[in-house]
Image (cartoon, rainbow, N blue to C red):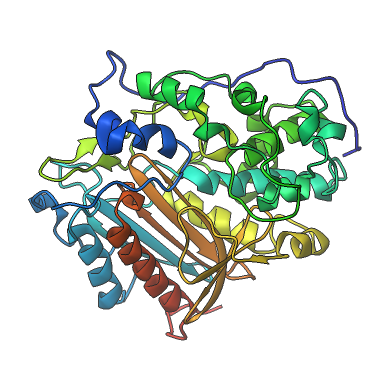
């Protein structure tokens, strides 16, 4: 692909073809929880914390479910996932997928939909929240490999219409969250819109307008600060240098090479069927289904992707491993900044690369990303060779409860240890 910078993008939008319920917008108790801030702050995975309290009674369909297609699974891992679901304020459902050299083990607890008893499945759709930032990293770094972008390209060079105060920021700094760009999802104007109408359809290409009057928070490259604006700018850069919609670039550079058949970037609130239902829980109240409460258009490249546990496993193995990128680009991707944590923080000690985080646990190191949004919390990671992967997906935003988040991180680390262990899974070349 030749390196070029065509005319500015002219407002094309994609729409989801996924079937979904229509009708009046639901009355949402969660819109007023924690002083009315949870939805607006959490649309893109900010770690909003609500006061802890007594949990509602655990529904009977949260009982432990057997492992899925995995063979000879570890009862301790199954018990850990079931205890997470059964914990005070725990998610109604959880599913973890471990893969090693093509052998897959699935662990699940609770239900994919309260009241049905249906267990979570690897092919169920779900919101991946800020793991979408790894997808935008895959697009941008794929374009770096193709010489359409350089890591030292600046906003001023590629996106001159953005504020002059931001022009020195580079693609590398955007991908590593060292840009200093103000976070549009924290702006009052954005939050007011989401509070008033969580299904509001935003022009995703104009999300940075919410903070266009603000300077950088710090000189580019001087420190780490996670910002949802970074990956919006990354996607806009990709569109600018190719003249193609970001959604089309995802298909060309990520979905097709990795055979991701259940992954998409919708513009509305609907989820493809079947899906893992996501819930908001509050003390003394039954779980509230918020799966389709919030429009993905307000998250876009920073958090709007919908995928499945099976697809997410394939993606993280390809992105953290050698399948998508050249060795030179991977070296840049994996130049980690100690202390740079994903949101929520993953297991162990976190360090920030380019659209990728390093998680150093007591059992070893994996590379991946986390995310959280109303109804969902995600963790996806792989070994450097991409041959071993782990995903843990739960159906509530556990970041609202620090104790539950700590339990989740401990559970994630337990799965990482199982992934890196030497147990024979029965695979034969």
Residue 426 screen position, x and y as percent:
43, 80
Query: At 81% from the left edge and 48% from the top edge, which residue is drawn?
Result: 144
Residue 89 screen position, x and y as percent:
20, 53
Task: Say which quarter of the image contains residue 124.
Answer: top left
Task: Say which quarter of the image contains residue 98.
Answer: bottom left
Q: If the image is split into quadrants, where does the C terminus sit?
A: bottom right
Work out whether residue 261 or residue 155 is closer to the camera in this orientation and state it.
155
- In the picture, measured across the screen, residue 28 lies left or right of residue 14, that is left
Task: Say which quarter of the image contains residue 338.
Answer: bottom right
Query: At 48% from the left edge and 77% from the top edge, which residue is drawn?
Result: 427
Residue 37 screen position, x and y as percent:
36, 34
- In the picture, measured across the screen, residue 65 lies left or right of residue 343, that is left
Count every numbered label the image shows and give the total.
0
- Is 192 located above or below residue 58 in the figure? above
- In the picture, measured across the screen, residue 98 lies left or right of residue 284, that is right
Q: If the image is split into quadrants, where does the N terminus sit?
A: top right
Query: At 29% from the left edge and 46% from the top edge, which residue is drawn?
Result: 50
Q: In this view of the protein, can residue 193 be seen by the observer?
A: yes
Query: At 69% from the left edge and 35% from the top edge, which residue is drawn?
Result: 233
Residue 393 screen position, x and y as percent:
37, 54
Q: In this view of the protein, can residue 290 be seen by the observer?
A: no
- In the picture, measured across the screen, residue 269 lies left or right of residue 58, that is right
């Amino acid at each position: 692909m030749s390196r070029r910078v065509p005319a500015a993008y002219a407002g094309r939008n994609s729409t989801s073809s996924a079937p979904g319920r229509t009708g009046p917008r639901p009355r949402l108790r969660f819109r007023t929880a924690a002083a009315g801030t949870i939805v607006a702050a959490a649309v893109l995975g900010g770690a909003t914390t609500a006061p802890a309290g007594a949990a509602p009674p655990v529904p009977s369909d949260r009982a432990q479910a057997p492992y899925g297609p995995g063979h000879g699974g570890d009862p301790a891992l199954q018990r850990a996932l079931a205890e997470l679901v059964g914990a005070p304020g725990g998610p109604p459902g959880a599913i973890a997928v471990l893969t090693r050299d093509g052998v897959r083990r699935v662990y699940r607890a609770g239900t994919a939909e309260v009241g049905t008893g249906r267990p979570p499945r690897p092919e169920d759709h779900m919101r991946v929240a800020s793991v979408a930032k790894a997808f935008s990293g895959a697009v941008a770094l794929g374009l770096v490999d193709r010489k359409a972008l350089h890591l030292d390209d600046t906003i001023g060079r590629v996106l001159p219409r953005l504020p002059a105060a931001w022009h020195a920021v580079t693609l590398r700094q955007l991908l590593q969250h060292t840009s200093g760009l103000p976070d549009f999802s924290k702006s009052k104007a954005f939050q007011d819109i989401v509070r008033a109408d969580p299904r509001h359809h935003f022009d995703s290409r104009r999300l940075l307008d919410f903070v266009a009057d603000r300077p950088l928070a710090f000189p580019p490259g001087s420190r780490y600060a996670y910002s949802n604006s970074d990956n919006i700018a990354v996607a806009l850069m990709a569109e600018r240098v190719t003249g193609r919609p970001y959604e089309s670039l995802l298909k060309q550079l990520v979905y097709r090479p990795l055979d991701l058949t259940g992954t998409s970037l919708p513009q509305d609130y609907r989820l493809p069927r079947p899906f893992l239902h996501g819930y908001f829980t509050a003390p003394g109240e039954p779980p509230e289904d918020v799966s389709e409460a919030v429009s993905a258009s307000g998250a876009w490249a920073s958090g709007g992707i919908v995928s499945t546990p099976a697809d997410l496993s394939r993606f993280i193995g390809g992105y953290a491993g050698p399948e998508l990128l050249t060795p030179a680009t991977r070296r840049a991707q994996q130049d980690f900044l100690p202390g740079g944590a994903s949101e929520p923080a993953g297991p162990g000690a976190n360090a920030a690369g380019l659209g990728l985080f390093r998680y150093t646990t007591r059992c070893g190191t994996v590379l991946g990303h986390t995310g959280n949004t109303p109804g969902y919390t995600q963790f996806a990671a792989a070994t450097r060779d991409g041959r071993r992967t782990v995903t843990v997906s739960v159906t509530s935003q556990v970041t609202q409860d620090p104790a539950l988040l700590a339990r989740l991180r401990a559970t994630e680390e337990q799965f990482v240890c199982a992934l890196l262990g030497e147990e024979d899974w029965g695979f034969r070349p």
